[in-house]
Image (tube, helix red, strand yellow):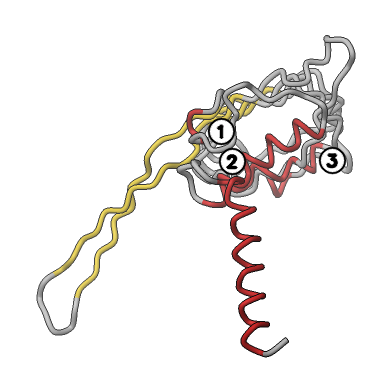
């Protein structure tokens, strides 16, 4: 095969790969990271033999999915030129996830007993998140696997009924950034150790 044909073959292969990946985030009017994280949530439910809500359909706007709340975030960019006294201001609006109501997908009092096998680091990309309710999902994981570092706007966090264990202790470093947190529910888990204290931790609780 000549060099020209080889280049064409590679190009066609890349196009086919791109096309096959498109449905994963098509129709979702969110940034790539947040869109990918929502589809990770759906895939993990299916992997756990749990049916996602009927509105969680590929190709639909992710913000229309049941339990997903979005808002518009406007960023203002100002630029000026050395050859002109004119200052240009550009407002860019994008949609972000502000709330996730994902409770009781694997409610522990149903039979047969289900467990949501979810990588709990998936939430760290939702930087504008204010409300996170994942209660009643029987995660059965260590609390330290929950990566919520950087969720500085998070106000409401419900982790109850998940059989979470404290592992090597409450992950202080991951929780000290939650300066906006006003509500925290850790009931019905397997946590017995002391909770972090100090002015930097959950100052509104």
User: What secondary structure is found at the residue carrying circle 1?
Assistant: loop
| x and y, in percent, of residue 107 in the image | 78, 16
Quick one: label 1 or label 3, which is nearer the N terminus?
A: 3
| x and y, in percent, of residue 3 in the image | 66, 89
| x and y, in percent, of residue 36 in the image | 61, 47
Residue where numbered disc 1 is placed: 181
Residue where numbered disc 2 is placed: 178
Rendered residue at 62%/21% (across/down): 54
Compare residues 56 and 89 and report the one nearer the observer: 56
C-alpha distance separating marks 2 and 3: 18 Å
Q: In which image quadrant can residue 203 be found?
A: top right
Above or below residue 81? Residue 201 is above
Quick one: label 2 or label 3, which is nearer the N terminus?
A: 3
C-alpha distance separating marks 1 and 3: 20 Å
Q: Give the residue furthest to the bottom.
A: 3
Q: In which image quadrant can residue 19 be found?
A: bottom right
What label sits on residue 169 in the rendered view? 3
Density class for disc 1 (Cα within 10 Å; few <14, some 14-19, many ≥20) is many
In which quadrant of the rendered image does the C terminus lie? top right
14 with respect to 152 (left or right): right
Rendered residue at 49%/50% (across/down): 31
């Amino acid at each position: 095969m000549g060099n020209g044909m080889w280049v064409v073959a590679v190009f066609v292969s890349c196009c086919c790969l791109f096309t096959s990946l498109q449905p994963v985030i098509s129709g979702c009017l969110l940034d790539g990271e947040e869109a990918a994280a929502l589809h990770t949530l759906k895939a993990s439910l299916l992997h756990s033999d749990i049916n996602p809500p009927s509105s969680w359909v590929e190709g639909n706007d992710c913000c229309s999915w049941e339990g997903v709340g979005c808002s518009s975030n406007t960023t203002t960019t100002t630029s000026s030129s050395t050859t002109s006294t004119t200052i240009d201001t550009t407002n860019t609006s994008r949609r972000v996830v502000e709330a996730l109501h994902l409770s009781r997908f694997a409610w522990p009092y149903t039979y047969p007993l289900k467990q949501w096998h979810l990588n709990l680091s998936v939430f760290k990309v939702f930087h504008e998140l204010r409300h996170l309710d994942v209660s009643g999902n029987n995660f059965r994981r260590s609390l330290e696997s929950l990566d919520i570092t950087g969720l500085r706007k998070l106000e409401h966090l419900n982790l109850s009924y998940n059989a979470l264990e404290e592992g090597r202790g409450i992950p202080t470093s991951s929780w000290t950034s939650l300066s906006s947190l006003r509500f925290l529910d850790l009931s019905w888990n397997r946590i017995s150790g002391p909770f972090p204290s100090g002015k930097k931790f959950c100052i509104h609780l």
